[in-house]
């Protein structure tokens, strides 16, 4: 029985491939016959054939019944289920925004501080500072931290528990933070630990940071040849590590020429053929890495490309790539070309827009997060039919904050906004709320934060 199924599948694939390749051969034959490949390879030449040949080619391509013959990927399955569920049938084109289910999200977030996490979180054993940050930042955006009347005893206890756990994650001699107690220091959990401590924001939290020891450690992670940072001793180097190292150094007021040298050149080497940016030179453009690259430039105080013709064309291509990730139908952002929309990119790419000064539709981004990102049991998810988790809860809410405070709102009037809670305003370059960042800046820099601290971006604080 099983072997019959396999055989049938093989026949199906074979027939599809034969028919598709016959059709494509027509294109290639006509493309290459006269003068060789054109600018775009053989395809462009097909248009130079007769009208009959062109129609014949199209007919053969359309003859292929894609729904029947193409094997669906799991991504396509996810997309179709999400569209069938809500996006196409119910909400596409409407201004409806589901209310923010504050109570359930707070329950989902605080459960972690008291109960045991499910077995699914075992894989995040080396990401403990990230868990602390995702939970604390999400609670903060929801207005649950530091507002005496809102802050419950549960949350007060959670804050102390998180400071205790982060203290255990500190590396020997205070040289950064590891992913868990006893683990080697790494720039990603160090960045997360710092953001978590800044979000708690009191002396007890900020006091566990040893600036001098962190500076000494960061110097050892710098590759002076490429300008980039490594994630840890002997670890990989990429723009994620470079962003995390620069964010830590800038926030702690320890960024100097030794750390900054060459970063700009490394970041410039990440531009992909389509205008976006990848994690390492030559990589595919990706929303998370593009964010790290742009935010890292702000941390260096660099101006955006705009001077020479080359720079200005790079800027336009980058702006176009970023804006093109905002899907019209769903309202959210996808992380890469031809990928599905995912709520976490509401932050990674949503935040690129104010950094670049690119206007974007705050209404539609807000609708995606509220209508499709919220899980009925509390917490936020990638898309409908996916499970909620702390990572998506943090970044979907961060994206919602970006949409509400930096996006363009055509429908912002009393009726449409009455039921939508406004989140606290997050900072696009270092994703903590503006009030927390201002307080930490005063603590580490001894002076107030100003917009020019991030290279005079287009956004205002
Ligand atoms: Zn995601």
Image (tube, helix red, strand yellow):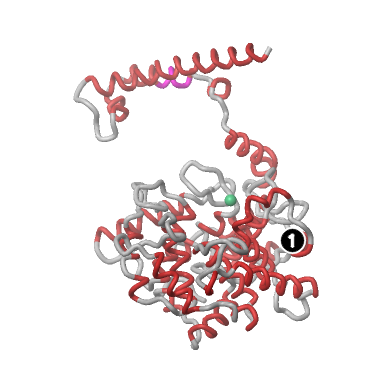
Q: Is residue 59 magenta?
A: yes
- Look at the image and tell me whether residue 116 can be seen: yes
Q: Position of residue 190 (x, y in %)?
A: 53, 67
Q: How crowded is mark 1: few (under 14 residues within 10 Å), some or many (20 or more)?
A: some
- Span colored in magenta: 58-62
Quadrant of residue 216 in the image?
bottom left
Between 460 and 90, the one lying in front of the other is 460
Is 30 positioned to the left or the right of 350 in the image?
left
Q: Which residue lies furthest to the bottom in this view?
A: 446
Res. 302 image quadrant: bottom left
43 sits to left or right of 137: left
Ligand 1 has an atom within 8 Å of the beta carbon of the residue at disc 1: no
| Residue 305 percent across, percent down from the top left | 32, 64
Lateral position of residue 19 relative to residue 146, left or right: left
Residue 410 appears in view: no
How many numbered tags mark residues here?
Answer: 1
Which residue does the image show at 52% across and 81% down from the upper left? 441
Q: Main secondary structure of the magenta part?
A: helix
* Residue 141 in magenta stretch: no
| In this view, 277 is above or below 461 | above
**Image coords of residue 2 (percent x, y):** 66, 15
- Which residue sits furthest left? 35
The residue at which mark 1 appears reads as 112
Which is more toward the observer, 182 or 47? 182
**Left or right: residue 303 compared with residue 254:** left
Taking the spot 62% from the left edge, 58% from the top edge, the residue there is 396
Residue 233: x %, y % from top left: 44, 60
Q: Which secondary structure lies at badge 1?
A: helix
| Screen quadrant of the N terminus | top right
Q: Which of 318 and 157 is in front in this view?
A: 157
Q: Where on the picture, by quarter, is residue 367?
A: bottom right
């Amino acid at each position: 029985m099983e072997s019959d199924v396999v055989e049938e599948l093989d026949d199906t694939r074979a027939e599809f491939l034969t028919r598709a390749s016959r059709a494509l051969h027509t294109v290639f034959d006509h493309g290459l016959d006269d003068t060789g490949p054109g600018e775009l390879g053989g395809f462009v030449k097909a248009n130079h054939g007769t009208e009959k040949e062109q129609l014949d080619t199209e007919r053969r391509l359309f003859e292929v019944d894609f729904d029947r013959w193409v094997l669906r990927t799991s991504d396509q399955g996810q997309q179709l289920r999400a569209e069938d569920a809500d996006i196409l049938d119910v909400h596409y084109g409407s201004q409806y925004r589901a209310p923010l289910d504050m109570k359930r999200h707070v329950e989902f977030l605080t459960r972690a501080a008291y109960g045991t996490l499910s077995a699914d979180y075992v894989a995040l054993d080396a990401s403990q500072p990230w868990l602390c940050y995702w939970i604390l930042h999400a609670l903060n955006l929801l207005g649950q931290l530091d507002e005496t009347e809102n802050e419950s005893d549960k949350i007060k206890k959670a804050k102390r528990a998180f400071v205790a756990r982060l203290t255990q994650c500190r590396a020997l001699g205070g040289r950064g933070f590891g992913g868990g107690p006893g683990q080697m220091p790494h720039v990603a959990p160090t960045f997360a630990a710092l953001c978590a401590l800044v979000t708690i924001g009191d002396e007890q939290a900020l006091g566990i940071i040893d600036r001098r020891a962190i500076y000494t450690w960061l110097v050892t992670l710098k590759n002076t040849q490429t300008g980039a940072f490594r994630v840890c001793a002997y670890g990989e180097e990429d723009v994620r590590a470079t962003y995390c190292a620069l964010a830590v150094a800038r926030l702690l007021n320890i960024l100097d020429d030794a750390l900054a040298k060459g970063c700009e050149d490394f970041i410039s080497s990440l531009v992909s053929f389509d205008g976006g940016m990848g994690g390492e030179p030559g990589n595919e453009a990706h929303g998370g890495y593009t964010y790290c690259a742009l935010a890292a430039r702000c941390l260096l105080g660099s101006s955006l490309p705009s001077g020479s013709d080359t720079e200005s064309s790079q800027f336009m291509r980058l702006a176009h790539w970023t804006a093109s990730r905002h899907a019209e139908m769903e309202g959210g952002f996808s992380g890469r070309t031809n990928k599905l929309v995912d709520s976490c990119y509401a932050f990674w790419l949503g935040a690129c827009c104010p950094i670049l000064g690119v206007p974007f539709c705050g209404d539609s981004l807000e609708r995606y997060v509220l209508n499709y990102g919220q899980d009925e049991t509390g917490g936020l998810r990638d898309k409908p039919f996916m499970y909620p988790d702390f990572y998506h809860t943090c970044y979907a809410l961060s994206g919602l904050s970006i949409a509400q405070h930096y996006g363009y709102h055509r429908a912002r009037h009393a009726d449409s906004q009455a039921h939508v809670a406004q989140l606290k305003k997050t900072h696009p370059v270092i994703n903590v709320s503006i009030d927390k960042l201002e307080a930490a800046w005063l603590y580490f820099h001894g002076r107030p934060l100003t917009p020019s601290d991030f290279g005079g971006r287009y956004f205002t604080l």
